[in-house]
Image (cartoon, coloured by chain):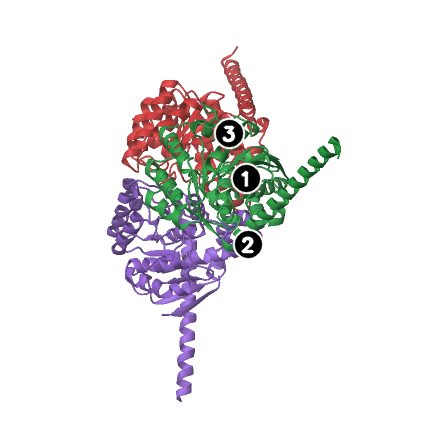
Chain colours: A green, B purple, C red
C-alpha cells in the first residue's frame, strides 16, 4: 500500500472502530434503561432542600425509587440498603459535618457507586472541608456545571482545575469545553466518570469523551435540572458502569428537554412536560439521542 | 320461621344494617368535606422536606390551611393553635429529638387529634426511639403503606406486627391485606383509626374495615402522594372523627387520582391535574367514591 | 383667581403631579424589568423549606438567579456575593440563631438591599428574638400579609402596630388597609419600602402609597405566592430602589396571577401557568398593570 492508502486505511479503521464503540455504547444504554424499568432500583440521597422534590420525582419517573435522609446513622443505613447513593451538597446543615464523611466512608468501604454533585464549591468552610475529604473517598461519578468541575479539580489539586472558584452561587460562569481537562483529570483520579452539564454536555471516563446534544434553554430557566440529573444518574449507576450511567442520564435529559420544550409555553409547563417525557422516553430513543465520541 | 328463613332474615338484616351504615358514613363524609370548605381549618405539620410543598398544597386544595415548623417551641405553639396536627418522620433532623416528643406530649394532653405517618420506620436510631415513644401518646390516626403499618405494629409489640421491618427506604414491599391485622390492632390500641395505602386502600377504626377503591398507577410514579394524604386527613380530622377523617381523605385521593389519570400524559401532568381534582371534588362525589364495608 | 378657581387649579395641579409621578414610576418599572432580563442578577436567600423551590423558580422566571443556604458562613458569603438577599423566617432551624443575625449584620454593614418576610411572627422564641433584632438592621423592604405587617410593627413598637399578633399560622386575619399605618411606620423607620399582600396589594415608601390590582383567588389556594413575591422583589432590588422593586414585584405578580387564572382549572394548573406568565410578562405590560397612587 502507498502511504496515502495506508493513511486512508487507518482513518477508515478509526472511523470503523468509533462506530463500533458507538454501537456498543448504545446497546449498553438500552440495557441500562430497560433494567431500571424492570427492577425499580433504589438509590438513597443526601441532597439539598431546594430541589429535593424534583430529584425524587425524576428518579421515580425513569423507573427508580427515591429515599432522602439527613441524619448520619440513617444515611449510613440507606447507603448500605440502596444500590447507589446520590450526594448533593447544595444546602448544607450542621449535622452534615458528621453525615457526609460517614456516608462517603461507608460507600468507599462497601465499594458501592455514589454520585457527587459539588454544588457551589467554595462558598463555605464545612462545604469545602467535606468536598476536600471526598478526594480520597473517590465518588464513582461527579456531576456538575463547568465552574463546579473546574473548582473541584482545583480543590483536589488535579490538572486542569482552577485555584479560584468561578462559581457564582449555583451558576456556572465557564463553558463545558473549558472544563474538559479538569473532567478528564477527575475521572482518571476516581477511576470513574464525570458529567459536565451545559448547552452541550460532556461525559468522560478519562479515556474517551462523549458530547451529548439536545436539551432546552428552559433547563436554565428552572431550578434543579442539574440536581435531578445527578439523581437519575445515581439510579442508572445501580445497573451499569459509572460511564454508561452518566451518559444514559445525560442522554435522557437531553431527549426529554428537547421534547418538553416543544409543548411548553414557559418554565412552569416545561417542568411538567419534562417529567412526562422522562417517564415516556423509550430505551431506543434514549440510546439514539445525538452524541459524538472522541478519544482523549 | 324455618332455619333457612331465619338465616335469610339474618342475612338480609345484616345487608340492611351494612347499607344503613354505609349511608351514615357517606353522610358524615359529606358533612366533613363541606365543613372544611366552609371553615378553612388549620392543621400544623412537622413533616419531611421532600414533599412538604405538596402536603401544604393538597391541604389548601381541599379547603384547609397549612403551616409547617421544625423547632420544639414552635411545634408546641402550632399544635395548640391548630385544630389538628400532622406528624411525618420522613426526614429527621437533630432538633426533632426534642420537637417530636414535645409535640406528641402536647397533643396528648390537650386531647387534640394528630396524624402519624411512620415513614421508613427502622432505618435509624432517633426515628425508632421517637416512634416507640409515640405508642403512649396515641396518635388519633396512623397512615402508612403496608410495610410501615406492619413495622409500627411490630415496634409497638401489637398483634399482627412484624419484628423485622420490610420497609425499603420509603416503599412498601407488603400488600395492604397483609397489614389488616396490624392495622386493626393499632386502631384498637390508639382508640383511633388507621389508613393503609396501596392499590386498594384500607381504613379501620378497629371495629369495621372499609376498603376504598380508585386512585391511579401514577400515584406511585410521583413522590408524596402518601404524605399529602396524611396532611389532608389531618385537615378533615379537625371537623370529624378519626375514622371518618381517614376515610374522607382516602376517598378524595382515590377520586382525584382516578380523574387526574384520565387527563395526564405522565407523572408531571398527573401531579398538576391531581391538585386540580382535589380542589374541584364535590362532597357528593367524594362520598360516592366506591367503598366496601366489612365488620371485623 | 377666585377661591374656587384656586381650588380647581390646585386640584388639577395635583392631578397633573400624580399623573407625572405615575408615568415616572411606570418608566422606572420598565427599566427595572428590562435590566433584570439583561443582566441576570443573583439574589441569595435564607428561606423556608416549604416554598423554597417555588421561590427559586419565580426568581429565575423573571430573569434572576437564585441560591439558597442555611449555614452562617455561607449566608455571609452569599450576602456579599449577591446584589441583594432575601430573608424569610418561615421554617426556623436551630442554626438560624447564628445565621440570621450574622447575615443581617453583614447586609447592614455592606449597605446592600435585603428583603424581610416576617412569616408567622409570634409563634416561637428564636423567631421573635431574631425579628426583634432586625429592627436595628433595617431591611430595605419588608413584605408580608396584613397580620404579619401589623405584628412586626407591634414587635418593633412602631405606630399602627398591634401588641398581640393576629397571625394564624401563616395566614392573615386582617385586611390590607388595616395595615396601612403600620406599613407606613415601618417604611419610615427603615427608610425603605413595605409591601402588604392581600386581595389588593399596598406598597409604600413612607411618603406615598400605591395600591396594585389584579392577581387571582388561586393565589390563596397555593402555598408560597407570598414567599415567591419576596424572592422576586429581592431580584428587582438589585437594579432599582426598594420602592420600585417592591412595586415591580407586586405588579408582575398581579399581572401573572390574573392571566394564569384564565387558563387554569384549579390550583395545580394555576401554579404552572403562573410561572409561565411570570416568564412571559413584558416590561410594558408589568408597568401598565392597574395601580393607584396616594400621597400619605
- Residue C80, x across and y down, in percent: 41, 22
Above or below residue C37? Residue B276 is: below
Q: Is residue C133 left or right of residue B64?
A: left
Q: Position of residue A138 (x, y in %)?
A: 43, 38
Q: Name the residue under label 2.
A: B261
Dots 2, 1 in contact, CB < 8 A: no
Image mark 2: chain: B
- Secondary structure at numbered mark 2: helix
**Local crowd at mark 1 within 10 Å, few (<14), some, or many (≥20)?**
many
Q: How far apart are marks 1 and 3 (CA)?
A: 34 Å
Is disc 2 surrounded by few (<14), some (14 to 19) or many (20+) residues within 10 Å?
Answer: many
Residue A167 is left or right of residue A254, and the answer is: left
Q: Do labels 2 and 1 share a chain?
A: no
| SS assignment at label 1 | helix
Q: What is the quadrant of residue C289 in the picture?
A: top right
From this view, report whether residue B212 is shown above or below residue B48: below
Seen as rendered, the residue at the extreme top is C1
The alpha-carbon separation of the residues under discs 2 and 1 comes to 20 Å
Q: In this view, does B16 lie above or below B83?
A: below
Where is residue B3? Give x, y as percent.
39, 87
Task: Give the image quarter of residue B240.
Answer: bottom left
Have a look at marks 3 and 2 and say if they share a chain: no
- x and y percent of residue A99 in the render? 35, 40
Name the disc covering residue A268, or none: 1
**Chain letter belonging to callout 3:** A
Does the image show residue C145? no
Does any portion of residue C180 appear in the rendered image?
yes
- Asked whether disc 1 touches disc 3, contact meaning CB atoms under 8 Å apart, the reply is no
What is the number of the mark on residue B84? none
Identify the residue position indicated by label 3 in the image: A182
Amino acid at each position: 500500500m502507498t502511504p496515502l492508502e495506508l493513511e486512508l486505511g487507518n482513518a477508515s479503521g478509526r472511523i470503523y472502530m468509533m462506530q463500533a464503540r458507538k454501537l456498543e455504547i448504545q446497546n449498553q444504554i438500552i440495557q441500562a434503561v430497560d433494567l431500571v424499568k424492570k427492577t425499580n432500583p433504589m438509590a438513597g440521597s443526601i441532597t439539598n432542600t431546594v430541589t429535593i422534590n424534583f430529584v425524587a420525582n425524576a428518579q421515580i419517573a425513569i423507573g427508580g425509587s427515591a429515599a432522602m435522609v439527613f441524619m448520619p446513622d440513617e444515611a449510613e443505613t440507606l447507603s448500605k440498603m440502596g444500590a447507589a447513593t446520590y450526594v448533593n451538597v447544595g444546602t448544607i446543615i450542621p449535622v452534615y459535618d458528621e453525615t457526609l464523611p460517614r456516608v462517603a466512608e461507608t460507600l468507599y468501604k462497601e465499594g458501592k457507586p455514589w454520585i457527587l454533585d459539588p454544588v457551589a464549591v467554595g462558598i463555605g468552610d464545612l462545604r469545602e472541608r467535606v468536598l476536600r475529604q471526598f478526594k480520597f473517598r473517590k465518588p464513582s461519578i461527579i456531576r456538575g456545571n463547568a465552574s463546579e468541575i473546574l473548582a473541584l479539580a482545583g480543590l483536589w489539586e488535579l490538572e486542569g482545575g482552577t485555584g479560584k472558584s468561578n462559581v457564582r452561587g449555583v451558576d456556572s460562569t465557564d463553558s463545558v469545553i473549558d472544563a474538559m481537562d479538569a473532567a478528564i483529570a477527575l475521572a482518571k483520579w476516581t477511576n470513574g466518570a464525570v458529567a459536565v452539564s451545559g448547552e452541550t454536555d460532556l461525559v468522560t471516563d478519562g479515556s474517551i469523551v462523549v458530547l451529548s446534544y439536545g436539551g432546552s434553554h428552559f433547563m436554565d430557566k428552572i431550578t434543579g435540572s442539574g440536581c435531578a440529573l445527578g439523581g437519575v444518574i445515581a439510579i442508572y449507576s445501580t445497573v451499569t458502569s459509572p460511564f454508561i450511567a452518566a451518559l444514559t442520564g445525560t442522554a435522557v435529559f437531553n431527549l426529554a428537554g428537547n421534547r418538553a420544550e416543544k409543548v411548553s409555553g414557559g418554565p412552569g409547563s416545561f417542568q411538567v412536560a419534562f417529567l412526562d417525557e422522562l417517564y415516556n422516553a423509550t430505551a431506543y430513543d434514549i440510546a439514539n439521542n445525538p452524541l459524538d465520541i472522541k478519544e482523549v
